[in-house]
Amino acid sequence: MDPKSLQTLELPKILERLADYAAFSASAERVRDLAPTTNLAEAVNRQQETAEAVELLTQKPDISVGGARDVRADAGRAARGITLDPQVLLNVRTTLQHGARLQRTLTQLRGQFPILAETASFIEPCADVVDAIGRTLNERGEVLDSASPKLARIRGEIRVAFDRLMSKLNAMVNNPNNTRWLQEPIITQRSGRYVIPLRSEFKGRIQGVVHDQSASGATLFIEPLATVDLNNTYRQLQLDEEEEVHRILAELSQQVGDRARAITRTVDALASLDLAFAKAKYALDTDAHKPELVAFREVSGAGTRAHPGSTLRLVEARHPLLDRDIVVPIDVAFEGDTYVLVVTGPNTGGKTVALKTVGLLVLMAQCGLHLPAKEAALSVFQGVYADIGDEQSIEQSLSTFSSHMRNIIGILDKADERSLVLLDELGAGTDPAEGSALARALLSALLDKGLTTMVTTHHPELKVFAQQTAGVRNASVEFDLETLAPTYRLIVGLPGRSNALAIAARLGLPEDIIEEARGLVSESDLAVDDLLDEIRRSRDEAAQALASAAQARAQTEAARDELRARLDAIEDERREVLRRARNKGKRDVQRLRTQVRKLRDQMRAAALPLDALRQVEARAEQLEARMETPVAPATEMPLEDEAEIPALRLGETVWVRPLQAEGQITELTAGEAEVQVGRLRLRARLEDLQRRGRLDRKLAEAEKRHDPLPTRAPSPGMELDIRGQLVEDALPRLEAYLDAAYMAGLPFVRIIHGKGTGALRHAVRESLRGHPLVRSSQRGAENEGGDGVTVVKIVEQS
């Protein structure tokens, strides 16, 4: 990549903003060194890494590299035999601990975040170093007494020696015979020795060594001769302690040095992960999205002007350095055989911003950054070259036509068909006629080299060139004549028009001058401007009509969905009412049959005729037959222009109403379907199945929230596994499970008891026999487990 173009397109400013999201210096350095890759696979991998980091931070907002520090240089110093300070050693431990913690988290989430987990695999926790530092130093960086037996002994002796010294000195300063000679009864230190303040006029009253005197000379600080040996002992023990502490720190530093390479690899991995986290945070804060990166496509073409096969499409793209609440998004698309875009329009209309937006977003995508655009599809360019002047900077006012030409000559020399070229104000800075001719010649050269190019210009001749030349397309930035201000919208497909006469008229220039100027303009130019105005108006009207149609369609679809939801809710409620009524009828018929049997027995015992009773039984059989008739679906209200709802298909996901569970259709007949629900297969009537699309699931949830009918208890599952349990433990579980299955409205369940000795199977089947909640039970089929399984049909709820 051309370093000057990277500066021109302001990529370093983006990287500086990105560095603000870095958690420690190593990752911030990695951010500032980030450069666009020219390898498609690496660019795609970078984008996927950022996407994984965005998803990870969305799920776990608090995840980070924590308090990691860049201790690579410190580890290198330790490897060279230099003793590290305690605080540096604590930084090493903290970094390794955070690395190990992050590695564990990402390893557990490898299935979701494989790229981040792969990076984390390079972290080496160095548990031996972490443990050694933890055993040696406390959180304040002080060496613990337990760091070595010798240190513990020395510090014990120091405490004893100090107590003896203080006892002796306290006895001296508190002795009434000495009080009148002392300036005050205190103990202080001078040159590391404990002394007492003696008034200078009583020098010699207490024998000792003078270590210092006050500024006024009124006080002498003496070490009494009686405490010299105690002071010497105490001081020697302090030196011994310092020597042992230094030895311990040197030994600990040597351990760090031995693992210097592992520590360096850990810091590098943490820096890479934090770089990904920084890109993700930047993407979340700027509402950026992952672009689609594509390879250069093969394009067949004859002659020297063949399309390079590049892709460049940006939808609602924003310049990331501008205020997102103010900047106007632009759409840029090199469609069809277009690979050169010529942008025209007034000054300060947004041409340069559009040019920079395209170039900067291409560079960001190849750095692995998500883009502030609704959609983006880009090729990975081998080079991005830009010659852009900022009209509002001092540098632009000092730039010359010659410097621009030198830049363009260098671009023509270095760029190839895998490059993106961005040129601002092509042909400006010289005589308009010569500049226009030169601009057209340069565009021809760019076309001949097959360079994907975007240029801005004020030369009207380039509009005609773009219109008449294959591979070139016009574009323009809008200008609002009512407000005399640019709208900053980029319109691809239409050239810009001159607004000088219209602006002058709006600003109040006399009409006669306007008319004279208009007369000096060729009629063809005026006709072209009028035609462009008409095209723009027609385009705006079409866009407004399209937006209105889209809004009306959305409202119609919403109303249609709401109506369908209401109809489905009514149908489900109707079916539930009929199901309850049918169940109640069955119970009534069953009670009638019971009463008839009792009555028959009584009539037989009394030797009475049974003719009337047989009529009652026949009527009961008719009622029962009617109860078995399936519930026909209600006639649905026809929706205008609604297509016929397609029949259920094999492999389709459906909702099994009796089970209140989802399953997949594995077999279809005229009136029934075989449905796989979990590990179970069952046959169900088609009217008990409901297609489950995404909308249906949402409606079902809404119906559950607002269902006026009582809801069933949650399902305990279709199986109870009691294999290996004792009979006295298994039977209570079986009883509780049957209660739950009945309350959930399950039609049948499977009890898995295994074969074994048969004792548990026998106890289970005996318990099921005559159970009030069990309609019937039978041995499982061979594909269900055979004798090891009992299939139980549950009675229906009252």
Image (cartoon, rainbow, N blue to C red):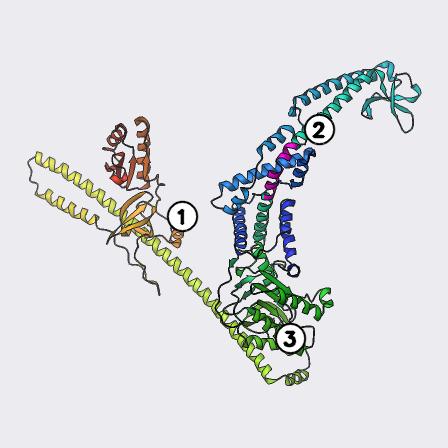
The answer to whether the residue labelled 1 contacts the one labelled 3, judged by CB atoms less than 8 Å apart, is: no
Residue 705 circle label? 1
Give SS at disc 3: helix
Query: Which callout, 1 or 2, points to the residue nearer the camera?
Result: 2
Can residue 106 be seen?
A: yes
Q: Mark 2 points at which residue?
A: 246
How far apart are the alpha carbons under marks 1 and 3? 72 Å
At mark 1, the secondary structure is: helix
251 versus 550 height, above or below: above
The magenta stretch spans which residues? 254-268
- Residue type at mark 2 is His
Ranked by sequence position, the earlier of labels 1 and 3 is 3
Query: Magenta stretch: dominant SS?
Result: helix
Residue under label 3: 438
570 or 693, nearer to the observer:
693
Which is more toward the observer, 579 or 795?
795
Judge left or right: residue 64 versus residue 229: left
Position of residue 156 relative to residue 710, above or below, is: above
Q: Which is more toward the observer, 707 or 430?
A: 430
Query: Mark 1 touching mark 2, by CB under 8 A?
Result: no
Which quadrant holds residue 159?
A: top right
For the residue marked with disc 1, what is the amino acid?
Arg
Total numbered badges shown on the rendered structure: 3
Q: Which quadrant would the N terminus be assigned to in this image?
A: bottom right
Q: Which percent across, then down, holds residue 458?
A: 64, 74
Helix, strand or loop under label 2: helix
Q: Is residue 349 magenta?
A: no
Quarter of the view holding residue 769? top left
> What amino acid is found at the position of numbered circle 3 in the picture?
Leu
- In the image, is residue 263 part of the stretch drawn in magenta? yes
Q: Residues within 10 Å of mark 2 (few under 14, many from 20)?
A: some
Residue 408 pos. (x, y %): 65, 68
